[in-house]
Image (tube, rainbow, N blue to C red):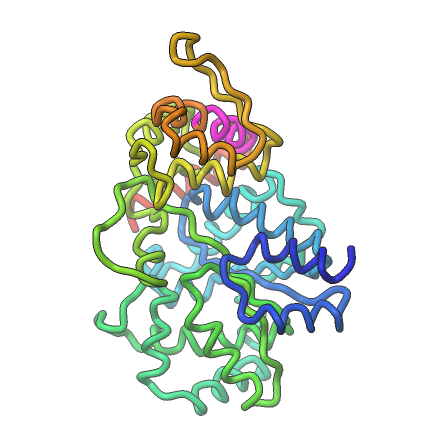
Amino acid sequence: MNVEERFNLISQVGEEIITEDDLRTLLEEKKHPVAYDGMEPSGNLHIAQGLLRAINIQKMLKAGCHFKLWIADWFAWMNNKFGGDLDKIRTAGHYMLEVWKACGLETEGIEILWAKDVMSDDSYWKKVVDIARHSTVSRVKRCTQIMGRESSDSMQASFIFYPCMQCADIFHLEADIAQLGMDQRKVNMLAREMGPKLGFWKPVAVHHHMLMGLQKPPTEGEGIDRKIALKMSKSKPETAIFMTDTDEDVKRKLGNAYCPAKVAEENPVLEYCRFIVFEKYKEMEIKRPEKFGGDLRIATYDELERLFVDGKLHPMDLKNATAIYVNELLEPVRNHFSKGKAAELLQLVKSFEVTR
């Protein structure tokens, strides 16, 4: 692919790219720029962490990126996941990798790295300290949103280390592109600020969309903070579809989902169709009785949205069809975790969640 084709493919991943000019220049200079995404092991994955992440990584690989997947076990430890039990966190990290493999992520084309493996490296800690030396406490506190925390929350000292370390990750991993969610925006901006000051580079930030939860959106808020408030959350299990949910779980959750007739904006069911279904299927079939217009075959998301907004597609028909496709995509993952060591691993991680 030429530079513009690669740029367009990465643009499909990035809801926001900082900056597009920097990305184009990078692609012109490097055939295989390094991109990274990191994730705390924290338990059962929902589809935004599983399917959507796999879709995004595959696009980055297709665009020629060398991708580094960062299993952020120490970060989960600092963030008190599983009560700060590092052994449980690492077990959950192995579970995450099994999920990604089961849902089709071609992990052989990815460099998988664990945070624990660099924690004895002096050069890593030098980067962390340099970033801390060139930042203020108030500046770093504003970045704690990346942990799912607010700057007004009661702060443990580990919460201050976290953004400095995540910023250092980018440079230690030699990442040209930080391909993280919109909720990680603040630390990526810190990295762009710190890079030139410390003799490094200014990384390109490719922030992917955060899939909505299935609940009715709040009536207040705007901008990035609103996007974060809307995102799918494990803490609200009935509004999130997990990678090992049963067929009935998926039908129930989507059946109860917020999906107002003729409204596309902040409609989570349409979001699933746009970011999951049409990424995996060439068309979407809506089955319905003849008295309600008969079956539909829809070739693009734009066509689906237009039919819905025009009132030619009922919310329940949309929900039912979406559930069929989501269940089909989750079936290989369910099968993988239904037997053997994978089943034991899943049950172990679920037991951690109960006692967390």
Q: Residue at x 39, y 66 (%)?
A: 146
Q: Quadrant of residue 25?
A: bottom right
Q: Residue at x 60, y 61 (%)?
A: 113
Residue closest to the eye, 13 or 92: 13
Residue at the extreme front: 310
Question: Residue 320: image x %, image y %?
Answer: 40, 23
**Can residue 329 be seen in this snapshot?**
yes
**Can residue 337 be seen in this snapshot?**
no
Q: Is residue 355 magenta?
A: no
Left or right placement of residue 310 versus residue 127 in this view: left
Which contiguous range is marked in magenta? 323-335
Left or right placement of residue 199 versus residue 237 in this view: right
Residue closest to the eye, 187 or 102: 187
Q: Is residue 333 magenta?
A: yes
Q: Is residue 81 above or below residue 254?
A: below
Question: Residue 277: image x %, image y %?
Answer: 52, 35
Residue closest to the eye, 89 or 279: 279
Question: Residue 13: image x %, image y %?
Answer: 56, 54
**Placement of the N terminus among the 4 image quadrants:** bottom right
Question: Residue 303: image x %, image y %?
Answer: 51, 33
Left or right placement of residue 79 versus residue 105 in this view: left
Residue closest to the eye, 147 or 142: 142
Q: Residue at x 59, y 36 (%)?
A: 280
Q: Chief secondary structure of the magenta span? A: helix
**How many marks on residues?**
0
Q: Residue at x 33, y 76 (%)?
A: 142
